[in-house]
Amino acid sequence: MANPQHLQLLKQGVTAWNQWREQNSDIRPDLGQADLTGANLELYNLTNANLDQANLAGADLRNALLKDAYMAGANLYMSDLIEADLQGACLQRATLAGADLYKSNIAMADLRQANLVGTLLRRVSLVEATLAYANLTRANLFQANLHLADLKSAILQEAILESASLIEANFEYAVLIAAKMSKANARRANFKGANLYKAEMDGMDLRDAILDKA
């Protein structure tokens, strides 16, 4: 359960909250299981915060600092995370369906088994992120950077990966049925056992890619 004092501080506004964070850098905010539906958290410093199973559906998290935050099982359905910093965050089994993460930094984040159906991930950084078994059906990853990302057994049916950087990414056993991957750079990527049925791959760079049983 969330710490009542931390919740009260959160409701005092971004200036008061960020000042408290700066003055109490040794305190980890505990907002686990908090109901923050539709909350305005733009520019909030939530670095390393505990948001385990928090409800952030429809929340405004634009430019929020969520680096190393623990958000396993959190509900971020239809939330606004444009240009948010989620580097190294734990988002295992989190729901991000319909959320907008345009130009956000999700590098090295843990998104295993996350629900990213229809999520807007245009121009995001997912460098070295873990997305194994995640559901990215119809997700928009246009010009996203997935260098060294792990998408083993992920579902990317009808996902948009056009002009994305997939260099050395792992798509082993991933489902890429009808995915749009035109002009993507997939050099040295691993597509072993991946389902590429009806995938659009015009102009893709597949030099040194592994396509065994794909």
Image (spheres, rainbow, N blue to C red):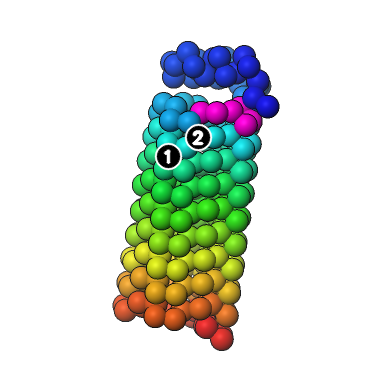
User: Which residue in the protein does label 1 denote?
Assistant: 79
In this image, 22 relative to 162: left or right? Answer: right
The amino acid at mark 2 is Leu
Magenta span includes 35: yes
Relative to 40, residue 135 above or below:
below
In this view, the residue farthest toward the bottom is 213
Residue 157 in which image quadrant: bottom left
Q: Residue at x 49, y 41 (%)?
A: 76
Image location (x, y in percent) of residue 25: 61, 21
Place of residue 7 in the rendered image (x, y in percent of width and height, measured from the top left): 57, 19
- Asked whether 86 or 119 is in front, the reply is 119
Residue drawn at x 58%, y 73% is 172
Q: Position of residue 162 (x, y in %)?
A: 34, 66
Q: Is residue 40 visible?
A: yes
Give the structural element (helix, strand or loop) at label 2.
Answer: loop
Position of 101 with respect to 1 (left or right) is left
The span shown in magenta is: 31-36
Locate the N terminus and report the quarter of the image it occupies. Answer: top right
